[in-house]
Amino acid sequence: MLTGQQADRPGSTTYAAAGVDVEGEERGMGGLLAWAQQSFTLRLGPGRPCLPLGYYANVLDLGNGTGLAISTDGVGTKLFIAELMHRYDTVGIDCIAMNVNDVLCVGAEPIAMVDYVAVEAPHADFLEQLGRGLYEGARRARITIPGGELAQVREMIRGVRPGYGFDLVGTAVGTVPLDRIIVGERVEPGDSVVGLRSSGLHSNGYTLARRVFFDRLGWTVDRYVPEFGRSLGEELLEPTRIYVPEVLDMLRAGLDIRGLIHVTGDGFLNLVRLKAEVGVVVEQLPEPLAVFAVLQEAGGVTDEEMYSVYNMGIGFCVVVPERDVERVISIARSHGVEGYRIGYTVADARRTVRLEPLGLIGRGSAFQRAGTNR
Amino acid sequence: MLTGQQADRPGSTTYAAAGVDVEGEERGMGGLLAWAQQSFTLRLGPGRPCLPLGYYANVLDLGNGTGLAISTDGVGTKLFIAELMHRYDTVGIDCIAMNVNDVLCVGAEPIAMVDYVAVEAPHADFLEQLGRGLYEGARRARITIPGGELAQVREMIRGVRPGYGFDLVGTAVGTVPLDRIIVGERVEPGDSVVGLRSSGLHSNGYTLARRVFFDRLGWTVDRYVPEFGRSLGEELLEPTRIYVPEVLDMLRAGLDIRGLIHVTGDGFLNLVRLKAEVGVVVEQLPEPLAVFAVLQEAGGVTDEEMYSVYNMGIGFCVVVPERDVERVISIARSHGVEGYRIGYTVADARRTVRLEPLGLIGRGSAFQRAGTNR
């Protein structure tokens, strides 16, 4: 991983330096994952997981050819932006988005999400706003919120506004016929990767973003930023885009969708989270959204770091044979979302992501400059 | 509610005085719940929720008569005991237990649980222990752990051991034929309530328990307590009992099970969480487990408070017609769990819980002495 080296480079800001221990997390995860994987043997009949760990969602075999997709995710430290703005009616959208977009990636139709809210204190206005955002997310994703849990754990939770610290987590479920699960198995070399526009940072990389904007630049959430055309806080609070309606339309239109990719925590390294042994060559990218450009420039963050943490303006990718590219783009457009053919797949057991416009090569958990010795 | 008054009574300790704002939570919850309930209209076909909010779990209609039960819950501040003991291999059992016991209450067979772990830091040994507990819980409940999320949110989480603060939450799913959902609808006056023995505090009321044992008595987790036959920490860390195998056996044995009750946060007030308009008369109770007796005595906690917060030794109840009582008890016994016929149901639109041995009457969210003016 390059993050360790970069952390020492003067003038640059990295995820590791910002306090996220990526290597430690990967080491630590090993034991936890091994036990979870071992649990798979506990059910061989109904309810058995159809996929190994590591995909965006798992699928449980409910019998009669029905699969239940399930995935869990939290909003993370984007919640601190809500606290700083004292505005809580949008992070529910993020919570729904992060979860339904994951469930969507296995080809499933999301049907519901349950929420877990841990709070320092149960302020009524705060909870009402939270509920409003969750409802709005549910509306966009066409799902229900059939249940949830409010945990009052004052001594366990903290935030950036005293008394208002909270955590917000969801678990989404969806249905998919077992013979229509999508895991990138049928991806072939030469397939096209279509990227769909993101709305902003979505819900990833806020620890680094906060270091840059608040600590390094000393900006506050109410600072007007000309490049954003609004305040820093409003920009950072922009809800994660929910790709459910357009992707379901693509699936129902009979397009030959071979891979679905939610561009989350690992940025463009997600592009090879496909079962087939392929790499991805990215030939062209739309201009990054302003929030990424400003963040990178102000933070002196390298391209390597930016593209391994952020979506840079592409929040979701659809892998299809060349002939379906235009249909994907036009269906996305009909939902108000720009789509771009950003690249194509190649046979590659090492699963390399090549970002040609930037001269970057990514494998495993990091990008590096093309031509650098490994 | 009586908690407010009791907080002022010298020498007594209550949930409210211990820092849990029950009234505030109920007020605050209103807005959040209203939005969640409104989301139910967003899906009228497949995936629609079959139950209103407020049951132990909801059930989603997956079509073809199949229901998916879903519920989410966290372990709460029992996690602090794990931190104090620096022992993390049992709280995973609690996480599984709290969730599968809820799913069980609607008559569903739990099949899987996903976990969410939020940590200050991803210590490898800690995570491995956590995974071991989750696996053990999954084994006891006969479910898998098909996925999960590890969130490294150092600034959002805190605990009682610096660097080791964490939160642990689960979402469990299960299956139930739509025509066999149990919500207490068929409960009739005169049905019997069979209580199943708990293993200890389970995962409720730890904020009050910590105030009593640690703050009031000044005990530490390694203090040997003769009544427990082990240290305070070992007693408090005793995992929540998982009632899945015995209750599934009861369901499969064709017993006429009309109500299933997981005795959690509201203690014995849970006994009337049944759709039928019934009250419950508790005629006899087994001796409370030692942990409750010591806690109550040492903390000067009233009966009213104890029975509205704790399970007092009865962690799960099964409501059946009189003729099935012996079968319920014998099936429980075959799984090593003591069962007792503790009382019976009566027609009562006000849903009163009468604890005859204690002279207590409970309605809504509190118990009070029988005969007290209302």
Image (cartoon, coloured by chain):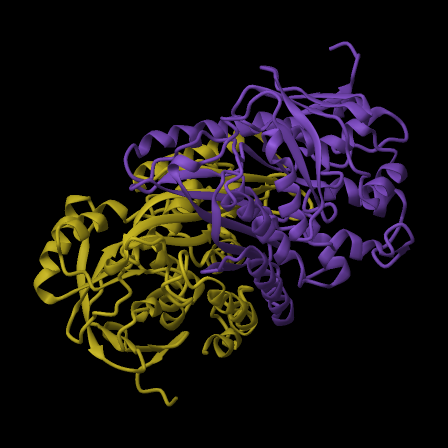
Chain colours: A yellow, B purple
Percent x, y of residue A310: 37, 61
Percent x, y of residue A259: 24, 64
In the picture provided, is A51 more to the left or to the right than A214? left
Q: Examine the rendering and report whether any part of residue B153 can be seen.
A: no
Query: Residue shown at 41%/56% (left/top)?
Result: A47
Decide: is A56 above or below A278.
above
In the picture provided, is A108 more to the left or to the right than B183? left
Find the residue positioned furthest to the top. B373
Decide: is A4 above or below B290.
below
Percent x, y of residue A350: 32, 82
Decide: is A351 above or below B302.
below
Figure quadrant of the C terminus of chain A? bottom left
Query: Residue shown at 17%/52% (left/top)?
Result: A250
Find the residue positioned furthest to the front. B323
Q: Quadrant of residue B9?
A: top right
Query: Residue shown at 40%/56% (left/top)?
Result: A46
Percent x, y of residue A86: 51, 37
Q: Examine the rendering and report whether any part of residue B10 can be seen.
A: yes
Q: Quadrant of residue A141?
A: top left
Find the residue positioned furthest to the bottom. A373
Relative depth, front residue between A343 and B140: B140
Relative depth, front residue between B326 and B3: B326
In the picture provided, is B27 more to the left or to the right than A313? right
